[in-house]
Amino acid sequence: MTTPQDHHILIVVENLPVPLDRRVWLEATSLRNAGYEVSIISPMGRGWDAPYEVIEGVHIYRHAMPVEAHSGVRAYVREYSHAIWHWFRLARLVWKRRPFDAIQGCNPPDLVFLLALFYRRRGVRYMFDHHDVSPELYEVKFGKRGPIYHLMRVLERISFKVADVSMATNDSFRDIAINRGDKHPRDVFTVRSAPRVEHFLPAAGDQTYRKGARTLIGYVGVIGQQEGMDLLVHAADHLVNTLAASVHFLIIGFGPARRDMVRDVADHGLDAYFTFAGPLYDCDLLAALNAIDIGVAPDPKNPMNDISTMNKVMEYMTLEKPVVQFDLTEGRVSAMQSSLYATGNCPVHFARQIDKLMNDSGLRQQMGQSGRQRVIKELSWAHSEPQLLAAYDRLFAK
């Protein structure tokens, strides 16, 4: 019988550097603490630019960040060809240091199976870590289906076919693995993304972010077109110019739509009501999030967002912040009574839900406490880690 100490796992991620990718870093450190040797291939970026380093016992190999695809087939081919070349190049370096026994492919893109197939002849198993529904992501990002969408459906199905075991971020993704990917239920494990509650502790926070406003609204995450940042700006406009609310918005993060959002804020005459803090990490992130009164998730209802778990919602809840979001299936599963829900992708209704919380401190406190307790009792990483380890037990038992 083998033990974790006998196994070396290679994790491959394309769309975020590690350890910035919080889910991947939680998985990697949990596996390392369980006794596995862990190596990671990821892009560089956001200050994580060393080609190779060891952090907390995890070996990280990085390559230059590809240009994100914004439109068309050629852009996607450039981005993913760049990544694939580096996966094979760096995997050879990892193999020379110590052969690995499993590859964990984190999508998007649904292409890490190519590396897995190459190493399968050497007895390497494949774990598919299903982060995003790539076909729906393409549909939402480009507003159409067409040949690329259907190609992504094929690549998704191949990823599940090649995978010996797969991990899903929630039960909606688990259903996709079983029904769309034809995986046996025994080979699909739900490993939710969630903070470590011992690190995400409620505190006073840095009140300088408030800028004199009665209520500080916070957003943390990617600033992209599919995250509904235009809807948030319209909601802010209604709060400020129709409801005359004393409010300030703190935007934490980075992304391809940041410049568009800054311009949108200016066009609405709202510059004085927004602070763009950029990406914040560790203590700086906690100081900012602890200062907010309400956390917002303006991701509109669409085929991708409706079944996705939003990390920001989990972080707000863990810090006892009430949430306002649109009425998404997995959003309700995560937050339940710790959130108010706007309907119809309507920014005015979104603003009204924020206003309701602004004017009811007792409700804010009740919802915030409910959220943290839900995370502690059911959703924290302490509840996901056993599922992660069980998935690898299953992988190496096959």
Image: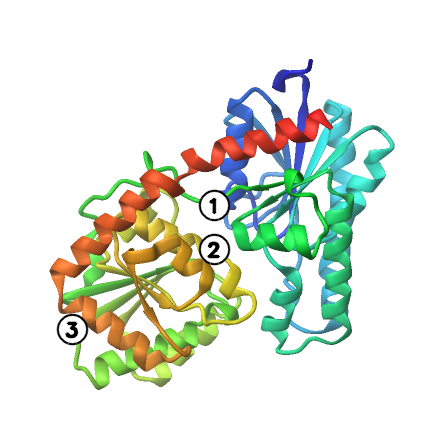
In-front residue for pair 64/33: 33
Residue 72 picture location, percent across and down? 72, 73
Label 3, label 2: how far apart the Cα atoms are: 31 Å
Label 3, label 1: how far apart the Cα atoms are: 34 Å
Would you say 179 lies left or right of 237 here? right
The tag on residue 193 is 1
Residue 16 picture location, percent across and down? 57, 50
In-front residue for pair 241/53: 241
Residue annotated with mark 3: 246
> Looking at numbered disc 2 in the image, what kind of residue is underneath it?
Thr
In-front residue for pair 57/298: 298
Residue drawn at 68 percent across, 22 percent down: 7
Classify 260 as above or below 57: below
Nearer the camera: disc 3 or disc 2 = 2
Would you say 226 lies left or right of 370 here? right
Residue drawn at 74 percent across, 43 percent down: 87
> Looking at numbered disc 1 in the image, what kind of residue is underneath it?
Ser
Classify 199 as above or below 180: above
Would you say 244 lies left or right of 194 here? left
Could you say which quadrant of the image residue 180 lies in? bottom right
Please identify the quadrant where the N terminus is shown: top right
